[in-house]
Image (cartoon, rainbow, N blue to C red):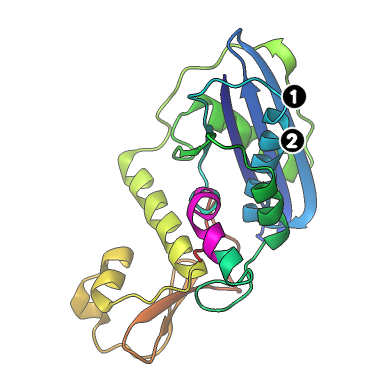
Amino acid sequence: MAAACDGACSGNPGPGGWGCLLRFDDGSVQEFGGADANTTNNRMELTAALTLLEKLSVLPRHPDLSIRTDSKYLIDGFSKWINGWKRKGWRTASGSPVLNRDLWESLDAARIQGLPLTYVKGHSGDPDNDRCDVIAVAFSKGQSISLAAGEIVAAPPAVDLAPPALQQLLTRLELADRLAEGEYGLSLMELAQLVEKPLKTLEGREAPWRWRDWQVLPLDDGRWRLCRDASGSGRPHGEERRDG
């Protein structure tokens, strides 16, 4: 058996969709999906995972089964941060309320012991992850899509869709989102490595400045913090993570 899930959103917040699937040992597949008119990518990622947990709770499972997802926000929140959030009364390390608390509480209640979440890079040719992405995007756009309901479906071969340079960029954008949502402070050296700018070009900067979809804000202790630029046109798929 294999399990995978994904979420998508246009505008973030905006119209969103989620998709997930279960692939059984006999080759049969069950697919699920849904939409929300005003949501975020993170909420769609969590909703897809919650659907799988609810489906798997009544099914026999191989002990090596894991749920594959390209959301590090989902993985880290579910396996690391949630215990700290609960201890702090659903507050992050900075004291702000945990976003998507309702879904995190539902995920925690639906937790299946011994069933881990496994990271797979999005758009990297993983057939089940790619299929979940297709489902999620279709629902987010209100498009018609046929979902497998138990029939045998051959998995397409894995294809490396993104060149190495683009994969590295996506990894950096994912990291930037996690840093922004976690409200982490970065040293000037760490910031230079993230934005791939020479350290000398950043030295002496004191005012906020923009990098891609983020505002880079100075902190009192000489560090810098990333903040999502509300004036941006949206964010790439799979971004914006929050630490506890």
- The picture places residue 114, in percent across and down from the top left corner, at 52, 34
What kind of residue is marked 1? Leu
Name the chief secondary structure element in magenta: helix
Towards the viewer: 209 or 83: 83
The verdict on residue 7 being magenta is: no
Given residues 80 and 142, the one toward you in this image is 80
Tag 2 residue: 33
Quadrant position of the N terminus in the picture: top right
Residue 159 lies left or right of residue 231; in this view the side is left
Does residue 40 lie above or below 154 as drawn? below
* Element carrying mark 2: strand
- At a point 48% along the width and 68% down the height, the residue shown is 182
- For this view, does 234 lie left or right of residue 179? right
Horizontal relation, residue 226 to residue 1: left or right:
left
x and y percentages locating residue 187 in the rendered image: 28, 77
**Tag count:** 2
Specify the label residue 208 is tagged with. Answer: none
The numbered dot on residue 147 is 1
Q: CA distance from mark 2 to mark 1?
A: 8 Å
Query: Would residue 77 be counted in the magenta stretch?
Result: yes
Q: Which residues are magenta?
A: 75-84
Earlier sequence position, callout 2 versus callout 1 = 2
Question: Which quadrant of the figure has residue 146?
Answer: top right
Q: Residue at x 51, y 59 (%)?
A: 81
Q: Secondary structure at mark 1?
A: loop
Residue 217 occupies quadrant: bottom left
> Could you tell me if residue 81 is visible in this image?
yes
Q: Are marks 2 and 1 in contact (CB under 8 Å)?
A: yes
Q: In the rendering, at what x and y percent does residue 160 appear? A: 40, 29
Amino acid type, callout 2: Gly
109 in relation to 146, above or below: below
